[in-house]
Image (spheres, rainbow, N blue to C red):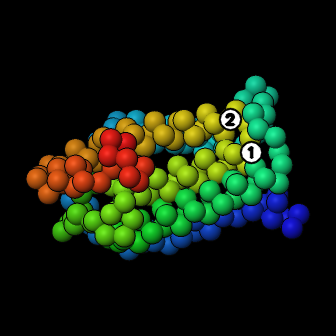
Amino acid sequence: MQFFYHYGITTLWLIWGLYWLAASFSVKAVRRQEAVPSRLSHMLPLALAAVLLSSRRIAGPYLCVSLLPHTLITFWVGVVLVAVGIVFSIAGRVCLGGNWSGTVTLKENHELVRRGPYRLVRHPIYTGLLFGVLGTAIAQGELRSLLALALIAVAFLRKIGIEESFLTEEFGNSYERYRSEVPALIPFLRQI
Protein backbone atom coordinates (compact mmCIF):
# COMPACT_ATOMS: atom_id res chain seq x y z
CA MET A 1 0.00 0.00 0.00
CA GLN A 2 2.88 2.34 0.79
CA PHE A 3 4.20 1.92 -2.78
CA PHE A 4 0.80 2.77 -4.28
CA TYR A 5 0.45 5.79 -2.02
CA HIS A 6 3.78 7.18 -3.24
CA TYR A 7 3.68 6.06 -6.88
CA GLY A 8 0.03 5.30 -7.68
CA ILE A 9 -0.78 8.44 -9.65
CA THR A 10 2.60 8.40 -11.38
CA THR A 11 1.99 4.78 -12.37
CA LEU A 12 -1.43 5.64 -13.81
CA TRP A 13 0.10 8.45 -15.89
CA LEU A 14 2.91 6.14 -17.08
CA ILE A 15 0.36 3.54 -18.21
CA TRP A 16 -1.50 6.29 -20.06
CA GLY A 17 1.74 7.48 -21.68
CA LEU A 18 2.69 3.99 -22.83
CA TYR A 19 -0.73 3.48 -24.39
CA TRP A 20 -0.53 6.92 -26.04
CA LEU A 21 2.87 6.11 -27.51
CA ALA A 22 1.81 2.69 -28.79
CA ALA A 23 -1.37 4.07 -30.37
CA SER A 24 0.53 6.85 -32.14
CA PHE A 25 1.93 4.38 -34.67
CA SER A 26 -1.46 3.64 -36.23
CA VAL A 27 -2.67 6.98 -37.60
CA LYS A 28 -3.63 8.19 -41.06
CA ALA A 29 -1.37 10.33 -43.20
CA VAL A 30 -1.55 14.09 -42.61
CA ARG A 31 -3.22 16.18 -45.30
CA ARG A 32 -3.09 19.58 -43.57
CA GLN A 33 -1.56 20.77 -40.30
CA GLU A 34 -1.37 23.92 -38.23
CA ALA A 35 1.59 26.27 -38.55
CA VAL A 36 4.50 26.00 -36.11
CA PRO A 37 3.75 29.31 -34.27
CA SER A 38 0.17 28.15 -33.76
CA ARG A 39 1.39 24.80 -32.44
CA LEU A 40 3.77 26.50 -30.01
CA SER A 41 0.90 28.62 -28.64
CA HIS A 42 -0.57 25.53 -26.96
CA MET A 43 2.45 23.22 -26.70
CA LEU A 44 4.62 25.56 -24.60
CA PRO A 45 2.01 26.03 -21.84
CA LEU A 46 1.47 22.26 -21.81
CA ALA A 47 5.22 21.64 -21.43
CA LEU A 48 5.46 24.17 -18.60
CA ALA A 49 2.48 22.55 -16.87
CA ALA A 50 4.09 19.09 -17.16
CA VAL A 51 7.24 20.43 -15.51
CA LEU A 52 5.21 22.00 -12.69
CA LEU A 53 3.30 18.78 -12.08
CA SER A 54 6.32 16.52 -12.13
CA SER A 55 9.00 18.43 -10.23
CA ARG A 56 8.76 20.13 -6.86
CA ARG A 57 12.39 21.19 -7.12
CA ILE A 58 11.99 23.01 -10.44
CA ALA A 59 8.73 24.61 -9.27
CA GLY A 60 10.53 26.15 -6.30
CA PRO A 61 9.37 26.77 -2.75
CA TYR A 62 6.84 29.51 -3.56
CA LEU A 63 4.86 27.28 -5.89
CA CYS A 64 5.03 24.28 -3.55
CA VAL A 65 2.85 25.92 -0.92
CA SER A 66 0.21 23.45 0.29
CA LEU A 67 -3.39 24.40 -0.47
CA LEU A 68 -4.94 21.09 0.57
CA PRO A 69 -3.97 18.74 3.37
CA HIS A 70 -2.17 15.53 2.42
CA THR A 71 -4.70 12.97 3.63
CA LEU A 72 -5.89 9.57 2.48
CA ILE A 73 -9.15 11.22 1.39
CA THR A 74 -7.47 13.78 -0.89
CA PHE A 75 -5.17 11.06 -2.20
CA TRP A 76 -7.99 8.65 -3.07
CA VAL A 77 -10.18 11.39 -4.55
CA GLY A 78 -7.19 12.30 -6.70
CA VAL A 79 -6.56 8.68 -7.74
CA VAL A 80 -10.20 8.17 -8.72
CA LEU A 81 -10.26 11.38 -10.79
CA VAL A 82 -6.99 10.45 -12.50
CA ALA A 83 -8.25 6.95 -13.31
CA VAL A 84 -11.62 8.19 -14.61
CA GLY A 85 -9.91 10.91 -16.64
CA ILE A 86 -7.41 8.51 -18.17
CA VAL A 87 -10.12 6.00 -19.09
CA PHE A 88 -12.24 8.76 -20.67
CA SER A 89 -9.30 10.14 -22.67
CA ILE A 90 -8.33 6.66 -23.87
CA ALA A 91 -11.93 5.98 -24.91
CA GLY A 92 -11.81 9.19 -26.96
CA ARG A 93 -8.53 8.16 -28.53
CA VAL A 94 -9.84 4.69 -29.40
CA CYS A 95 -12.92 6.19 -31.10
CA LEU A 96 -10.77 8.62 -33.11
CA GLY A 97 -8.60 5.80 -34.36
CA GLY A 98 -6.41 6.89 -37.26
CA ASN A 99 -7.85 10.42 -37.20
CA TRP A 100 -5.89 11.25 -34.01
CA SER A 101 -2.90 13.56 -33.98
CA GLY A 102 -0.94 15.24 -31.20
CA THR A 103 -1.11 18.49 -33.15
CA VAL A 104 -3.99 20.05 -35.04
CA THR A 105 -4.24 18.29 -38.39
CA LEU A 106 -6.64 17.01 -40.97
CA LYS A 107 -5.92 13.46 -42.06
CA GLU A 108 -6.43 11.71 -45.36
CA ASN A 109 -10.08 10.57 -45.40
CA HIS A 110 -10.68 12.41 -42.12
CA GLU A 111 -13.92 11.41 -40.43
CA LEU A 112 -16.21 13.39 -38.14
CA VAL A 113 -16.44 11.05 -35.14
CA ARG A 114 -19.64 11.29 -33.06
CA ARG A 115 -19.67 7.91 -31.32
CA GLY A 116 -18.54 6.82 -27.87
CA PRO A 117 -17.53 9.71 -25.62
CA TYR A 118 -17.91 12.07 -28.61
CA ARG A 119 -21.67 11.81 -27.99
CA LEU A 120 -21.11 13.53 -24.61
CA VAL A 121 -18.40 16.09 -25.46
CA ARG A 122 -16.66 17.21 -28.64
CA HIS A 123 -13.19 16.91 -27.05
CA PRO A 124 -13.24 13.90 -24.70
CA ILE A 125 -9.45 13.52 -24.73
CA TYR A 126 -9.08 17.02 -23.27
CA THR A 127 -11.96 16.45 -20.85
CA GLY A 128 -10.32 13.26 -19.61
CA LEU A 129 -6.91 14.84 -19.30
CA LEU A 130 -8.32 17.82 -17.40
CA PHE A 131 -10.05 15.44 -14.97
CA GLY A 132 -6.78 13.53 -14.58
CA VAL A 133 -4.78 16.68 -13.93
CA LEU A 134 -7.46 17.88 -11.49
CA GLY A 135 -7.04 14.57 -9.66
CA THR A 136 -3.28 14.98 -9.63
CA ALA A 137 -3.66 18.53 -8.32
CA ILE A 138 -5.98 17.40 -5.52
CA ALA A 139 -3.61 14.61 -4.50
CA GLN A 140 -0.57 16.90 -4.60
CA GLY A 141 -2.47 19.72 -2.95
CA GLU A 142 0.03 22.39 -3.94
CA LEU A 143 -0.13 25.75 -5.70
CA ARG A 144 2.07 24.44 -8.53
CA SER A 145 -0.53 21.79 -9.36
CA LEU A 146 -3.34 24.33 -9.51
CA LEU A 147 -1.21 26.56 -11.73
CA ALA A 148 -0.46 23.57 -13.99
CA LEU A 149 -4.18 22.81 -14.25
CA ALA A 150 -4.88 26.43 -15.25
CA LEU A 151 -2.11 26.36 -17.87
CA ILE A 152 -3.43 23.13 -19.33
CA ALA A 153 -6.98 24.48 -19.46
CA VAL A 154 -5.81 27.62 -21.29
CA ALA A 155 -3.70 25.55 -23.71
CA PHE A 156 -6.61 23.21 -24.45
CA LEU A 157 -9.02 26.10 -25.00
CA ARG A 158 -6.54 27.61 -27.47
CA LYS A 159 -6.10 24.26 -29.23
CA ILE A 160 -9.86 23.67 -29.34
CA GLY A 161 -10.33 26.97 -31.16
CA ILE A 162 -7.81 25.95 -33.80
CA GLU A 163 -9.22 22.42 -34.14
CA GLU A 164 -12.77 23.63 -34.47
CA SER A 165 -11.75 26.06 -37.19
CA PHE A 166 -10.16 23.18 -39.14
CA LEU A 167 -13.18 20.92 -38.58
CA THR A 168 -15.68 23.60 -39.56
CA GLU A 169 -13.79 24.20 -42.80
CA GLU A 170 -13.66 20.46 -43.49
CA PHE A 171 -17.19 19.38 -42.49
CA GLY A 172 -19.20 22.63 -42.79
CA ASN A 173 -22.81 22.34 -41.67
CA SER A 174 -22.29 18.84 -40.24
CA TYR A 175 -19.75 20.19 -37.77
CA GLU A 176 -21.85 23.27 -37.00
CA ARG A 177 -24.79 20.99 -36.16
CA TYR A 178 -22.52 18.83 -33.98
CA ARG A 179 -21.29 21.96 -32.17
CA SER A 180 -24.88 23.03 -31.48
CA GLU A 181 -25.81 19.59 -30.13
CA VAL A 182 -22.77 18.58 -28.05
CA PRO A 183 -20.76 20.67 -25.55
CA ALA A 184 -17.02 21.11 -26.01
CA LEU A 185 -15.65 19.89 -22.66
CA ILE A 186 -18.23 19.43 -19.93
CA PRO A 187 -21.01 16.91 -20.53
CA PHE A 188 -24.57 18.25 -20.41
CA LEU A 189 -23.45 21.92 -20.56
CA ARG A 190 -24.08 23.38 -23.99
CA GLN A 191 -21.87 26.46 -23.76
CA ILE A 192 -18.65 24.94 -22.37
Q: Please tell me whether residue 120 is drawn above or below residue 25 in the rendered image.
A: above
Please identify the quarter of the rendering in which residue 58 is found: top right
Using the rendered image of the protein, determine whether residue 14 is visible from the camera's viewpoint.
Answer: no
Query: Within 10 angstroms of label 2, few (less than 14), some, or many (20 or more) residues?
Result: many
- In which quadrant of the rendered image does the C terminus lie? top left
Q: Nearer the viewer, residue 57 or 126?
A: 126
Q: Which mark is residue 107?
A: none
Q: Amino acid at mark 1?
A: Gln
Q: Position of residue 164 (x, y in %)?
A: 26, 47
Q: Position of residue 157 (x, y in %)?
A: 39, 40
Q: Nearer the viewer, residue 52 or 154?
A: 154
Residue reaching furthest top? 62
Residue drawn at x 40%, y 35% is 41
The answer to whether residue 29 is left or right of residue 150 is left
Do residues under tags 2 and 1 come within 8 Å of each other at their CB atoms? yes
Q: Position of residue 162 (x, y in %)?
A: 29, 42
Q: Position of residue 142 (x, y in %)?
A: 73, 37
Residue drawn at x 61%, y 47% is 134
Residue drawn at x 52%, y 54% is 129
Q: Which mark is residue 144?
A: 2
Question: Regarding mark 1 in the picture, which secondary structure is present there?
Answer: helix
Please identify the quarter of the rendering in which residue 2 is found: bottom right
The answer to whether residue 141 is left or right of residue 135 is right
Disc 1 target residue: 140
Q: Amino acid at mark 2?
A: Arg
Using the rendered image of the protein, determine whether residue 128 is visible from the camera's viewpoint.
Answer: yes
